[in-house]
Image (cartoon, helix red, strand yellow):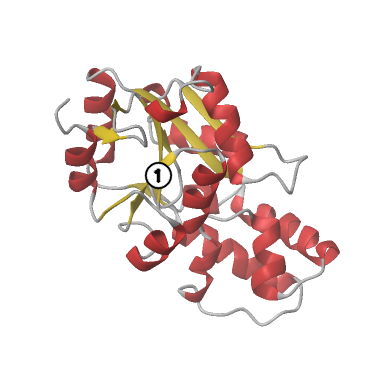
Amino acid sequence: MKKQNTKGEMIMYQALLFDLDGTLTASGEGITKSVRYALEKLGRKAPSLEELEVFVGPPLLGQFMAYCGMSEEEANLGVKYYRERYNQTGLYENRPYDGIKELLGQLKEKGFQLGVASSKPEHMVREILHHFHMEDYFRVIRGSVPERLKMTKAEVVEEALKDLGYEQRREEAVMIGDRKYDVTGARTAHLACIGVTYGYGTEEELKEAGADFVVHSVKELGRLLMEER
């Protein structure tokens, strides 16, 4: 796809960075059930699974603190309990979105450089992509480092850009994600961002965060990315 930059030049995106949860896979069930498990172990009343979808996308530690009003110490314990369930069960309560694997294959065939940039711990990102036979579509797979609990989305994006060799070619790269955290992470890294509403974020959320484009289906995403390709 082509986009006009601030100098009036037409830029063709070459590198596509995808979020995982809510963009490549519908992972809400496993995440929300694991958050509920953690809250119950902490002796807290758990909201409905639908309400807990706010945990799909953002870094886990910060969301426990922001959404539940936890101290950092309690939030760290929440992350520990969450992973007790998620690492065994929640990881697989998940599925690729309809048509996403076909789209990735088409994009790779067209010569796009594909990467994943997720706030989820990197070993889990790799396990999920391997489980669904999706890892071979991507040149680069980046997630957060468990030892760096405060690692931001922008930091993950920066590492993915570096691995792809686009640090000095940011105008040719775009982030694709379903939540405001993807947009703000892209903005902090000076990247354009495409928001998708078929995941867990809304059009209003994505537009308010500053998404350059918003699409509502995998098919629409494919049409946008391969426009004039």
Residue 52 x/y as whole percent? 53, 71
In the rendered image, the residue lying farthest to the right is: 73
Residue 223 x/y as whole percent? 16, 40
Looking at the image, which residue is at 61% across and 34% down? 123
In the depicted view, which residue is nearer to us: 38 or 169?
A: 169
In the rendered image, the residue lying farthest to the front is: 7
Q: How many marks?
A: 1
Residue 210 x/y as whole percent? 42, 55
* Residue topped by disc 1: 193
Give the answer, above or below, for where 12 lies relative to 181: above
Residue 155: quadrant of the picture: top right
Give the answer, above or below, for where 63 lies relative to 169: below
Looking at the image, which residue is at 55% across and 35% down? 157
Looking at the image, which residue is at 68% across and 72% down? 39
Dot 1: element? strand
The image quadrant where one finds the C terminus is top left
Residue 12: quadrant of the picture: top left
Give the answer, above or below, for where 222 lies relative to 56: above
Residue type at mark 1: give it.
Answer: Cys
The image quadrant where one finds the N terminus is top left
In the rendered image, the residue lying farthest to the left is: 228
Q: In the drawing, does residue 80 fall left or right of residue 86?
A: right
Residue 121 visible in the displayed image? no
**Label 1 Cα neighbours within 10 Å, binned few <14 / some 14-19 / many ≥20:** many
